[in-house]
Amino acid sequence: MPFREWITNPRHQPWHYQQYIVPEIPFRVHYHPEYELTFTRNARGLRYVSGEMGSFDEVDLVLVAPNQPHSWQSSRNTDGSSQTLQIVFFNEYWLKTLAEQGLPELRQICSWLARIRHGLLFSPVLSASLVPLFAELHEARGLARINLLFSLFAALQRDEGARPLGDALAPRAPEPRVELALAYLRSHYTRRVTLAEAAAAAHTSEANLKRLLDEVLGRSFSAILAQLRITHARNLLISTTQSMDSIASDSGFPSPSNFYRLFALHTGMTPAAFRRLRDSV
């Protein structure tokens, strides 16, 4: 399973910055209760965030939501050059407290953060433009550093090219009944769950919930349930040595054959091929 990482922060600050200069990035799936903004430069490899695996190249900027399993992995550069990771950890409670006690300008940032369920990949254009700001952040101290942090937040939330990571179920628009149904499914997908149960949790009829899921998410009930189970299975495939049958059972699939079929249908590869991805860098 992913391990719970304890962030090195001896003064228990509400936000914390770290920089690493490394020859390569090892694959270590982990999670923690803080948000993590990771800026990776001069590295190429695989990025894993809450069930979604993809490649990254040269400049990569990602915001990972709290308690989401994640990792990066890269090989050594052929020219022997170092790879740079600049990481900002912060907790949402700190920003909400500031917003409520004298900095209402931060409310917009708090609302933006609340919509990030798993992770957010920022556009290459924005990422490249923020290289100077991250350089300043590394050198700055005191109020200058906190001002740069807030400038960074403001730039991030304006990025129209950012895309969600590990979150295929992000609603196109807020809909309370859909949110209630999704919350119920996210809590119960590892067992047998029915449309009737989800509709009851959303305080609506089965027919109405089917219509809402199609209108708001563009997905059927069965497709949503499969996506939740596949994301869970991806996490287990990457971070454990469990057998395929065990993963199928733990992820809520009714049978191993159903697991193999739906995983291949949704990802375009077998579970075994997905597990081998982490070793392909």
Image: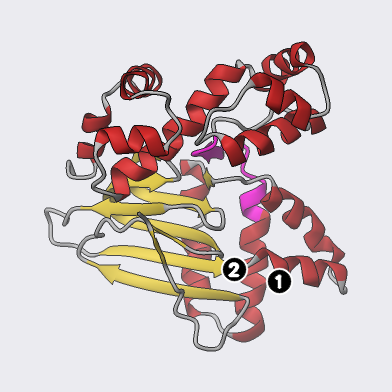
Q: Residue at x 20, y 38 (%)?
A: 276
Instruction: Check whether the beta carbons of the residues at disc 1 and disc 2 lie within 8 A of each other.
Output: yes
Q: Which residue is mark 2?
A: 90
| Stretch of the chain drawn in magenta | 155-167
Give whichever of 211, 49 is nearer the camera: 211
Q: Position of residue 205 (x, y in %)?
A: 80, 17
Q: Position of residue 39 (x, y in %)?
A: 43, 58
Q: Residue at x 13, y 61 (%)?
A: 80
Write down the quadrant of residue 193 in the picture: top right
Is residue 213 visible to us here?
yes
In the displayed orientation, state which residue is furthest to the bottom. 11
Is 168 situated above or below 183? above
Q: Residues within 10 Å of mark 1 (few under 14, many from 20)?
A: few
Is residue 53 visible to us here?
no
Q: Position of residue 105 (x, y in %)?
A: 82, 62
Hey, what amino acid is under mark 1?
A: Trp
Q: Residues within 10 Å of mark 2 (few under 14, many from 20)?
A: some
Instruction: Provide the secondary structure element on which disc 2 rests.
Output: strand
Colouring chosen for the image of the structure: secondary structure
Q: Which quadrant would the N terminus be assigned to in this image?
A: bottom left
Is 121 situated above or below 89? above
Give whichever of 184, 197 is nearer the camera: 197
Q: Residue at x 40, y 21 (%)?
A: 266
Using the numbered discs, state the Cα–Cα distance from disc 1 to disc 2 in whole angstroms.
Answer: 8 Å
Q: Which quadrant would the C terminus be assigned to in this image?
A: top left
Is 70 situated above or below 18? above
Give whichever of 226, 254 is nearer the camera: 254
Write down the quadrant of residue 143 in the picture: bottom right
Q: Which residue is mark 1?
A: 94
